[in-house]
Image (cartoon, helix red, strand yellow):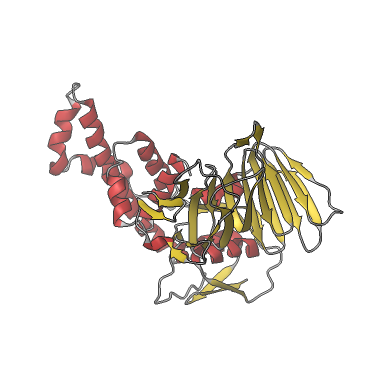
Amino acid sequence: MNQIEYYNQLIRKYFANLASEEEQEQMRGLMNDPTFLQAWEKIWKEQSYPIQPKEYPDLQRMLGDILSDPRIGKSTSSELATTERPFIFFRKWWQIAALFLATCGAALWGYDTYRTNDVNTNVLVSARPIVPGTDKAVIILENGQQIDLSLIKGDTVIDQGEYLITKDSKGQISYSLKDVSVQTNKVAYNTIITPKGGEYNLEMADGSLVQLNAGSKIKYPVRFIGGTRSVDLEGEAYFEIAKMESGGKRVPFVVTSGTQTLEVLGTHFNIKNFGDHIVTTLIEGKVKLSFADVALKEQVLVPNDQVVFNASRATIKKEQVDPFYSLAWKNGNFAFDNASIQSVMDEVARWYDVEVKYEDQLEGQHFSGTISRYENIDKLLKTISFAGGVHFERKGRRIHVLK
């Protein structure tokens, strides 16, 4: 996950009231970072909805009221007339802007709450709140020991004898060998499992990065030896593969997902493996897909290629796509392009850890749109209901889908 993606996730968690005290403190320290502030403004604008209300709050008047506030007016006016202290002015200005955006957000939220109550979705609110997914996973060591990563604080090192497991301040797990000169033929494997409502980031021993989506599992070696790097994936993950050489030759990276095998040398790609369908989307570089069924031809993918492999029917569909929709989850969003309501609700169920029941035949019901993965569950359902032509009833953690 790069810096901008991390900022986006941090800000969305803040808007959804899911940011920890540590994360909130980190955000306060970023108020002078232009990149962070641009991300803040962008995500705040995403809170708007496709239907325009009859009368939005007068944002210019609201900003004027803030600027005229005696608590900030004096310091602001003096700094506006000073050219020798641009840094302080910049900092104070964004403090005002942050207050302005927060005020606008509160006003728009109040309006939206009033508006969405008119949408006929029949959502029955549960006493137990349903919240979006967070960084949580279990790591299973070679000896079978299980460690709940959500219980380990940031900047913690776990000593495993020959190697160290580090959880950094952003929650990412990485591996390092105590003595890289030690030669061994023994390969130890770890497994990370994300539950429903969880996701996690991993940096493997070769420097390759993996972002694991909810309800997923990856098994990998703690160090790569030999002529091939291999991992096993169930569920969905985004990979950024680091290049690795041995004896002057590049070492290929292999991802096995069910009966599909993907081989790369260094590239970025997304694999989604739930049920019978395995969807592989290439972002950068080149990969080769092969299959256990020898009747199926190998597939070589170039950027923006997507292959959908139906394991039960032994069929392959390959086409050029916009990778935005495949990568939306790793950037903190749901994004769908004419997706069936079943596909949409499968994503919702995994992320919010809820059960979905279909009460009616829903043929031809499709949904297109983008919404934050950190949205309130009831607000999310109302948005889908409006755009997708369906209705919902929520009873506890069970969501009933109706025409």
Where is residue 7 shown, x and y percent of the image?
A: 40, 44
The C terminus lies in quadrant: bottom right
Q: Is residue 220 above or below residue 40?
A: below
Residue that appears at 71% across and 66% down:
363
The residue sitting at 38% across, 52% down in the picture is 157
Q: Residue pushed farthest top?
A: 84
**Which residue is painted at 68% across and 56% down in the image?**
257
Asked if one can make out residue 66 in the rendered structure from this viewpoint, the answer is yes
* Left or right relative to 37: residue 274: right
- Which of the 4 quarters of the picture holds residue 295? bottom right
Task: Indicate left or right for 296 with 274 as reference.
Answer: right
Residue at 47% of width from left, 48% of height from top?
175
Query: Of 264 and 89, which appears nearest the observer?
Result: 264
Q: Nearer the viewer, residue 79 or 197?
A: 197
Could you say where residue 1 lies in the image, as x and y percent from the top left? 48, 44
Q: Is residue 48 visible?
A: no
Percent position (x, y) of residue 268? 60, 41
Task: Give above or below for 190 relative to 397.
Answer: above
* Residue that sits furthest to the right in the current view: 295
Residue 61 placement (x, y as % from top left): 27, 43
Is 248 placed above or below 241 here? above
Q: Is residue 216 left or right of residue 71?
A: right
- Nearer-the-camera pick, 19 or 245: 245
Q: Quadrant of residue 342?
A: bottom right
